[in-house]
Amino acid sequence: MLNLHVLQAENGDCLILEFGTTDTPKYILIDGGPQTIYDHYLKRQLQKIKNNGAKLELVIVSHVDNDHIIGLLDMMKELDVHQTNSLEKTISIDAIWHNSFSRTLGDGTNIETRLRKLFSTTDDFSYVLSKPSKATRGIREGDHLTRYALKLNIPLNSQFKRGLISVDEAPQAITMENLSLRIVGPTKKSLEELKKKWIEWLDKHEPKTRDLRKIYPMSDRSVPNLSSIMILVEADGKKILLTGDARGDHLIQGLRQANLLNPNGTLHVDILKVPHHGSCRNVDEEFFKMITADTYVISANGKDGNPDLETLIWIVKGAKEQHRNIKILVTNQTSSTEKLLEEYLPDEYGYKLTVMEKEIPSLVI
């Protein structure tokens, strides 16, 4: 058995993998969505899992953007309160996979120290507090998650020798019951490139800038995204590709390094979690010709323009050119999905668009 539960996560991601057997199902949680998602949707799903006598075998944090990690922090905070007060836990967790900032970008560098110093000594500190960069905010949120894991005695990255989750550190599949998890990103190469970019940025801005307004637009909003954990999930002949908010070229690089692409450089899966909520800044038309799926899942509510109409067009045009009938599942109706239906007729392009109903907290594929 392999099912993907797509939870309503508004502008973020919150997914649950169900595997094992129908008699003894097992579960993995991937991301927890932004603020309110835990209370409104995720907690109910976890209670159902517990009521069925199950637990979370694993929690995976794809990356530390708030639209992915806040729901997990809310969950961990509640578990901490339950433990402190000897209350019954909402759910039991066996392990967590999480690449902290210090592991991904700080290892062997002083980037983390320099960033903390820069954003704590600016003359306009009120601006930092009201509108912090995603990078510095990610350091804080990631630290909180790590501390909760230690306090709750939940093993963190225990399957990885150096504690870093990457293609290079996990060249072989990790198996759980009938499930196979293959890490396809990030790669050591992409992380090294990211380190260089941060050092160059710090070298440029540290000496001459004290006003955060001048440098905030340059704060690389994609840094947490580019270090996203990406996983190819397989069970019972089915494949799901989980992409976080990664760039398409980084995903292909990781798949190639893991020798998971076909001889012609392509990969077909049953379900593709479209990167970065369908943003056209992370993928291009060629990506959807190389990485194809029967079902495309997009978690977005229109914030930041996601999903972009261009991305939806690339998906349906690519499928039509390859004579594939596909399904697209979106968590929310947006102007882009409406335009797609108007301008690229489903019958003509061979796709079915499903929008999650508002009153339903999750949809199972």
Image (cartoon, rainbow, N blue to C red):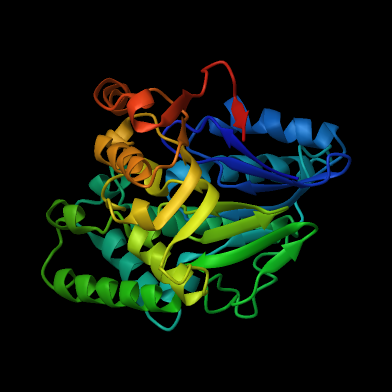
Q: Is residue 226 left or right of residue 103?
A: left
In this orientation, which residue lies closer to the viewer: 350 or 207?
A: 350
Quarter of the image where one finds residue 96: bottom right
* Along the viewing direction, whichever of 171 and 13 lies nearer the viewer: 171
Q: Horizontal and vertical percent for residue 88?
A: 84, 37
Expressed as whole percent of the image width and height from the top left, the position of residue 338 reads: 31, 21
Position of 119 relative to 108 (above/below): above
Residue located 38% across and 24% down the image: 347
Is residue 83 rendered to the left or right of residue 75? Answer: right
Total marks drawn?
A: 0
The quarter in which the N terminus is drawn is top right
Could you tell me if residue 247 is visible in this image?
no
Asked whether the viewer can see residue 122, the reply is yes
Q: What x and y, as percent, mark residue 154?
A: 73, 59
Residue 168 rendering spot, x and y as whole percentages: 52, 79
Q: Which residue is at a point 53% across and 29% down the rendered structure image?
A: 8
Q: Quadrant of residue 17?
A: top right
Q: Quadrant of the C terminus?
A: top right
* Quadrant of the image occupied by residue 334: top left
Q: Is residue 336 above or below residue 86?
A: above
In the image, is residue 304 above or below residue 344? below
